[in-house]
Image (cartoon, helix red, strand yellow):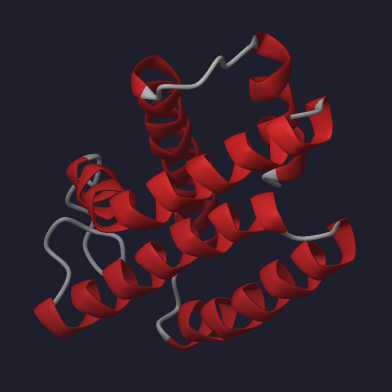
Amino acid sequence: MDEGELMEDKNRSLYNYLVEKAPDMTKDWRSFQVVKAGSDYSADAPLERARKVEEQNTKYFRTVAKSLLQTEEEMKETIANWTKQTSADRVKSRTSLVDVQRNLSIFRKVYWMHIKRFAETADLDIKAGDIFHWQEVSY
């Protein structure tokens, strides 16, 4: 197997791992939430709103994971479509940009926690260059 095929195999393995773990990643993301009245992200958000945000978050984890298998153009389009839909929801609920940015930061933290777990537990020869590659294609 040449290096290109080996990297494709690692990308596919990481993609499968992240898609499978997306609900767990959302639970981890939710655990970082604090009580902030009126925020969709708040630990005390109304149940219906909290579920919608969690569904969107799980979808976003899977969307970002999909970037591992896409060209740069495909990835940009996928992320742009998700962003349009979610940002419209945040505008309707009057979620502040500060809350959105804070939760994007939490998202990244959780995403990379799980990539670290994958790298530590996968039965693959994962090198630092692989991790830097994943960082480049993930956003």
The residue nearer to you, when weighing 83 against 46, is 83
Q: Is residue 100 above or below residue 50?
A: above
Q: Is residue 71 above or below residue 52?
A: above
In-image side of 79 versus 112 (left or right): right
The residue nearer to you, when weighing 87 against 62, is 62
In-image side of 96 versus 131 (left or right): left
In-image side of 4 versus 53 (left or right): right
Residue for point 88% across, 65% down = 73
The residue nearer to you, when weighing 117 against 41, is 117
- Residue 88 at x, y percent in the picture: 56, 86
- Residue 87 at x, y percent in the picture: 58, 77
Residue for point 23% across, 58% down = 42
Quadrant of the rendering where the N terminus is positioned: top right
User: Residue lying farthest right?
Assistant: 73
Number of numbered discs present?
0
Quarter of the figure with residue 23: bottom left
Q: Is residue 18 above or below residue 120?
A: below
The residue nearer to you, when weighing 12 against 73, is 12
- Residue 46 at x, y percent in the picture: 13, 77
Residue for point 81% across, 28% down = 2
- Residue 47 at x, y percent in the picture: 11, 78
User: Residue lying farthest top?
Assistant: 128
Quarter of the figure with residue 32: top left
